[in-house]
Image (cartoon, helix red, strand yellow):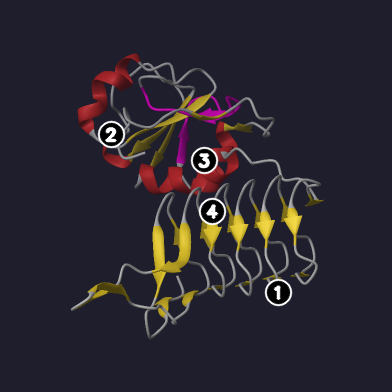
Amino acid sequence: MSGETHAPRTGGGDGQTPITAADVAAQVGGRLVGDPTVLVRGVAPLDRAGPHDLSILSHRRYGGWFAESRAGVVLVALELADQPGRPATRIVVERPMDALIGLLGHFQRTEPRAAGVHPTAVIAPTVRMGAGVTVDAHAVVGDGVVLGDRCWIGAGATVGAGSSLGADVRLHPRAVVYPFTELGDRVVLHAGAQVGREGFGFVPRPTGVVRIPHVGRCVLEHDVEVGANSCVDRGSVDDTVIGAG
């Protein structure tokens, strides 16, 4: 949410518990002005917020939207505490955006997670699986793979033979882990990401261009996140390593 007019509305409609304006003020350490009992069910920018939404006013240039906003509660920058506007319930804080970031987790929609292995998943008999692992529909897990505790392998994802995944690894749908790849704890591969594939390496020879064999591994250490449709190739001689964090 880089500006009050660019963020999509979030929260609401998924059963999370609403919180009062007083609760919000307490969590962010702000000064409450207005009705402490207003219920907040979601987050929205000023120009799209409704009576049960939380929004922010961090800069005077958004004063026009603030004047007409229907937001139930607004996090207002200290220097804008007296800004004229329709919202009657305000929480005055030094850094509204920082305060909002600390609250977003309360409104985040939680993706449902099934327990165990879906009947359409293909799991090699030599796979070693930790506690609390989820494997969704049509995923494929190859020979000798190690899945750490609480790994979640999304629909249609593939884990190649001999790969090792640490605890709490999340592979989103259609992510691909090529054979003999190593993922540390809490690694996240978003949809369509591919890690451990052979790199783009060729050598010109008198008889033509020859592909270089890639014998290195691909290693993603703890807390690495790879975006959707990204590729991380293995090395030709040495390992490709993305360090922790």
What amino acid is found at the position of numbered circle 3 in the picture? Ala
Residue occupying image coordinates x 59% and y 70%: 185
First-in-chain label (2 vs 3): 3
Distance in Å between CA atoms under marks 2 and 4: 46 Å
Q: Which residue is mark 1?
A: 144
Query: In the drawing, what numbered circle is on residue 25?
Result: 3
Pointer 2 and pointer 4: residues touching (CB < 8 Å)? no
What amino acid is found at the position of numbered circle 4 in the picture? Ala
Q: Nearer the viewer, residue 64 or 243?
A: 243
Distance in Å between CA atoms under marks 1 and 4: 19 Å
Callout 4 secondary element: loop
Instruction: State the image coordinates of residue 54 (x, y, percent, origin top left).
Output: 48, 30
What amino acid is found at the position of numbered circle 2 in the picture? Leu
Q: Quarter-wise, where is residue 33 in the image?
A: top left
Distance in Å between CA atoms under marks 3 and 4: 41 Å
Residues shaded magenta: 31-46
First-in-chain label (1 vs 3): 3
Neighbor class of circle 2 (other Cα within 10 Å; few <14, some 14-19, many 20+) is some
Q: Which residue is mark 4?
A: 175
Distance in Å between CA atoms under marks 2 and 3: 17 Å
Instruction: State the image coordinates of residue 197 (x, y, percent, origin top left).
Output: 45, 66
Q: Quadrant of the C terminus?
A: bottom left
Neighbor class of circle 3 (other Cα within 10 Å; few <14, some 14-19, many 20+) is many
Residue that extends furthest to the front in the rendered view of this protein? 207
What amino acid is found at the position of numbered circle 1 in the picture? Gly
First-in-chain label (2 vs 1): 2
Residue that extends furthest to the bottom in the rendered view of this protein? 238
From the image, state whether disc 2 or disc 4 is nearer to you. Answer: 4
From the image, state whether disc 3 or disc 4 is nearer to you. Answer: 4
Q: Which residue is mark 2?
A: 80
Callout 2 secondary element: helix
